[in-house]
Amino acid sequence: MNLRSLKFLTSLGRDTRQFAIIGLGRFGRAVASSLHGMGYEVLGTDVDEKLVAQVLNEKIVTHALTLDSTDPNALKEAGILEFDTVIVAIGNYVQESIITTLNIKEAGVAHLVAKASSKIHGKLLTRVGADQVVFPEYEAGCNLAYTLTKPAILDRFDIDPDHSIVEVLVPEEFDGKTIAELQLRSHYGLTLLAVAETDEKFAINPPPTRQLYKGSAMIVLGSNKDLQRLPI
């Protein structure tokens, strides 16, 4: 279960089927590859012909083309303004990122996600109309900190600055005990959402009689302060 994808996926409209990605650097390629792998139609664009050729060779997009996204006419001719969701992944070129975001929102695209390289960049993107701003480098840094200090935490999704959903290994103190016996809500202030059945499948909302075993995974929801109290 990839918790990090929840923030992006849950923000999408139910009818979203097509995505245009502007900027095919590491972040843009990663998003393109994930969406294409899930069966969505993905158009990748970049001003760099080599990056466009690379995603075509890797077959991680449906279509790809070279264009200058700061030119409104180029966006229109490429059909980008007709897509359900546009992702502006130009994080390192602030001026181009902001102009591109402004062009797309002024043209009426319903949902635009933009990558920011700093808080100021993020604020500017929001002011020119970005519906969602992501900070992949910051999020990667936070995840690394959790991995280094709490190795039992396998994955994490921030709901807001104070609350998270985490996938965590069942600690030794919980081994062999049932969910009812643990009373996670009263003892830790946490809600158990799922328990791993296999490496790829989870039992959602497991019954109170379900036993937990050390080394298997569980997914819990709660405040970051309460999550820190888990014996992991």
Image: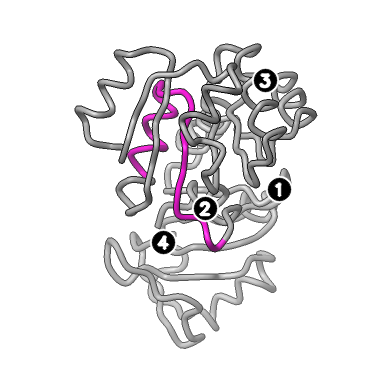
- 4 or 3: tag closer to the N-terminus: 3
Label at residue 172? 4
C-alpha separation, residue under disc 4 versus residue under disc 3? 50 Å
C-alpha separation, residue under disc 2 versus residue under disc 1? 16 Å
Amino acid type, callout 4: Glu
- 1 or 4: tag closer to the N-terminus: 1
How many numbered marks appear? 4
Amino acid type, callout 3: Ile
- 2 or 1: tag closer to the N-terminus: 2
Rendered location of residue 42, percent (x, y): 38, 42
Name the residue rendered at 32%, 72% in the picture: 197
- Residue marked by disc 1: 160
Helix, strand or loop for disc 2: helix
- 3 or 2: tag closer to the N-terminus: 2
Q: Mark 4 near mark 2, Cβ–Cβ under 8 Å?
A: no
Helix, strand or loop for disc 1: strand
Amino acid type, callout 2: Leu
C-alpha separation, residue under disc 3 versus residue under disc 2? 23 Å
Rendered location of residue 141, percent (x, y): 53, 28
Tag in front: 4 or 2: 2
- 3 or 1: tag closer to the N-terminus: 3
Name the residue rendered at 64%, 65% in the picture: 190
Tag in front: 2 or 1: 2
C-alpha separation, residue under disc 4 versus residue under disc 2? 33 Å
Q: Residues within 10 Å of mark 1 (few under 14, many from 20)?
A: few
Q: Please identify the quarter of the rendering in which residue 36 is found.
A: top left
Tag in front: 1 or 4: 1
- Residue marked by disc 3: 98
C-alpha separation, residue under disc 1 versus residue under disc 4? 29 Å
Rendered location of residue 134, percent (x, y): 60, 34
In this rendered view, identify the residue nearer to me: 2 or 106: 106
